[in-house]
Amino acid sequence: MFGRRPAARRALVDTKPNWLHRGLAVLAVSALGVGVAGSVALTGSAQSSSATPATAQPSVVTDVVPGVKVPDAFDARSTSVTRGNARPPVAAATAAGRLSAHAAEAEASAAESAASSGEQVADPQAIEARAEALAATASSIEKQDDTLVAKRKKAIAAAKARATKGCVPVVGGYTIAARFGDVGAWARYHTGFDFSAPIGTGLRAPTAGVVMNAGPGPASGWAGNYVVIKQADGTQVLMAHMSRVSVEVGQKVSPCDSVGAVGQTGRAFGPHMHFEVYPKGIEPGDVYKAVDPLPWLTKMHIKP
Ligand SMILES: [Zn+2]
């Protein structure tokens, strides 16, 4: 009972291939010139289900067997043309019918697979929508790129500004108690600027650079605890008499970074931060080689 269904199904499935085989057999048989009746019978059976109208031949030749006298109708044909040439009208018709049927089938299956694999691809509106989405994405990326370029430019400008824009070294209020070149309490003249402020007042790096001295050093005899910062261009600034130092030698600092506090260490007559500027190549502490800090402060946009 259960075995029948698959068999029946197989028979259905096998229908088409059998047709094809039969068609091929017709061609082969007629080409070999064997069994006219058999070939016609096969052709007839094949034609019965094809679109091509059947000829009257099958009814005429069904009883013909090899060796039996061939009817006049066949004789006439065989004498005027070869059998191979006489057959094609029928064979070609059925073959063409099958080919066109196959072509239609292939077309249908292609259309079906196209429809199932990507309806959106075939839909012009979907394509347009997708193109618009892509364009929007591209535009967004372009904008982001512009933003990044702008940010980078800004960062570079800020870095340049930092390199040339200094920071007032004293947090909060102060007074300039003495300027460069002042004479009076000093051996020859005053070698820097005195920022007068209470002890403990915060001190900041006036420029970006590397800390060369932090606390006691070669100039401590007069400078007490002092900080030296070397700029990239080789200029060094010195901050003297500090009560507290919060940086270390070798440390990189940016403008306004905290470096310590105002004091009265070393030779000082009151709480203040003595500030000096040394050109490139001059050892800080060699006080009479220090230059007037004012041009440097002005260049760094620091108003003392
Ligand atoms: Zn001073």
Image (cartoon, rainbow, N blue to C red):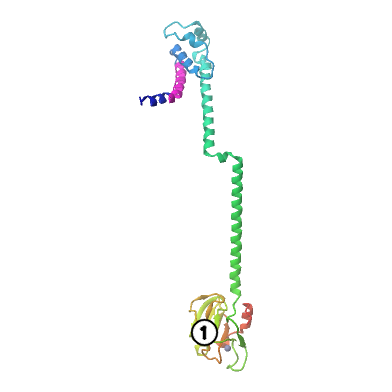
Q: Position of residue 106 (x, y in %)?
A: 52, 30
Question: In this figure, which residue is indicated by the disc labeled 1?
Answer: 226
Residue 201 vertical position relative to residue 87 in the rendered view, above or below: below
**Residue type beneath disc 1:** Tyr
Q: Nearer the viewer, residue 19 or 88?
A: 19
Q: Is residue 28 magenta?
A: yes
Looking at the magenta stretch, what is its main secondary structure?
helix
172 left or right, relative to 31: right
Q: Residue at x 61, y 42 (%)?
A: 125
Find residue 213 and report its horizontal and vertical position in percent.
50, 82
Can residue 281 be seen at all in this image of the molecule?
A: no
Whether label 1 lies within 8 Å of ligand 1 gets the answer: no
Q: Give the vertical position of 90 relative to 102 (above or below).
A: above
Query: Where does the magenta region start and end?
Result: 12-31
Mark 1: secondary structure: strand
Q: Could you tell me which residue is drawn at 47 percent across and 20 percent down?
A: 23
The answer to whether any part of residue 128 appears in the image is: yes
Residue at (59, 73) in percent of width and height: 162
Where 125 falls versus 236 (above or below)? above
Seen in the picture, residue 128 relative to 260 is either above or below; the reply is above
Q: In this view of the protein, which residue sits in the foreground, 203 or 213?
A: 203
